[in-house]
Amino acid sequence: MYRIVKAEKLAEKIYLMDIEAPRVARSCQPGQFLIVKMDEVGERIPLTICDYDKEKGTVTIVFQTVGASTEKMAGLKEGDFFMDVTGPLGKASEWIEEDIEVLKQKKILFVAGGVGTAPVYPQVKWLHEHGVDADVITGAKTKDLVLLEKEMEAVAGNLYITTDDGSYGRHGMVTKVIEDLVNEGHHYDFCIAIGPMIMMKFVCLLTKKLEIPTIVSMNPIMVDGTGMCGACRLIVGGEVKFACVDGPEFDGHLVDFDLAMKRQQSYKTEEGRAMLKLQEGDTHHGGCGHCGGDK
Ligand code: NAD
Ligand code: FES
């Protein structure tokens, strides 16, 4: 059992929890995710890791209530327990393998959209702790939905907040801020964009035009997080990949976002899943064979 040591409501429908999971915390690296399960019959919920403290042995998750399971999860309080916390899963961000001195020479731009701000934070923090101060754009619909502002300010080189309605920070979507920064003379060697699928798609269309290599996190399309369900199948550079096993981070300029978003809609219904299994055959999932998709 994994005890919740902090439970906080950050904004409407958005919650933060620190959970005691020392073995998970010890091995965490930026870019990875974990899976929580509330009880024996509970759904497995994959979530990107918002923070980790190797000494305290805690991991931090931030989630938005989107259905019955996350709604129930939001009701958990400090002192309650998760039955399972599995992780860290997925591959760590590729750039952590780079020589730190080389990384220090690079100008890095993070683009964080809404709840996607949570998984951006550990990456910016890791870089800051290694002497690299990256620029961060955080976008939210409105002032009350701006997340982790103080935390991000403490680790970012420059933090640019923007709201769709102009109620706080700059006015407009994150793509407008990218264009403004480039027009103001900023140069970026690479960009990491994490947020809703539609945001990542439009950030990538823009950064392709601006010739800024861009990494995205395909966590939003995951369901079971183990390569078995086939939910997170996507096409990257013409190849079939699974976000939970091969990612979650990919070269955003190679991701077929339109297909991924269409597929995400189809996956929601039983009929849609049956159609995907039929169309995709033995490439429907990571190969467990449980769903019969490759029979
Ligand atoms: P949101 O809809 O409020 O969007 C956040 C920001 O993204 C906006 O303020 C805007 O600046 C930008 N944006 C949105 N649409 C855009 C467009 N068409 N063009 C350019 N920029 C655009 O976000 P939210 O409601 O907080 O997001 C929830 C989503 O975030 C969920 O779908 C969840 O799956 C996803 N999420 C993704 C990750 C990940 O790893 N990629 C992690 C956590 C959450
Ligand atoms: Fe099920 Fe990746 S989330 S296969």
Image (cartoon, grey):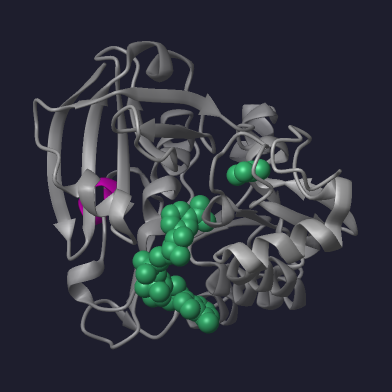
Q: Quadrant of the N terminus?
A: top left
Residue 149 drawn in magenta:
yes
Image x and y of residue 51, in percent: 35, 34
Q: Report whether residue 152 is seen.
A: no
Q: Quarter of the image holding residue 92?
A: top right
Q: Quarter of the image holding residue 8?
A: top left
Instruction: Name the one closer to the observer, 51 or 130.
Output: 51
Span highlighted in magenta in the image: 148-153
Q: Report whether residue 200 is seen.
A: yes
User: Does residue 239 sit above or below 170 in this rendering?
Assistant: above
The number of discs equals: 0
Point out the residue furthest to the right here: 238
User: Does residue 219 sit above or below 129 in this rendering?
Assistant: below
Prevailing secondary structure class for the magenta stretch in the rendered image: helix
**Residue located at (54% from left, 41% from top):** 224
Image x and y of residue 186, in percent: 57, 69
Q: Is residue 237 left or right of residue 27?
A: right
**Residue located at (67% from left, 73% from top):** 262
**Residue located at (87% from left, 58% from top):** 237
Q: Is residue 90 left or right of residue 79?
A: right
Residue 85 drawn in magenta:
no
Instruction: Name the one closer to the observer, 70 or 237.
Output: 70
**Residue located at (25% from left, 78% from top):** 142
Image x and y of residue 113, in percent: 43, 65
Image x and y of residue 130, in percent: 48, 28
Instruction: Name the one closer to the observer, 165 or 8.
Output: 8
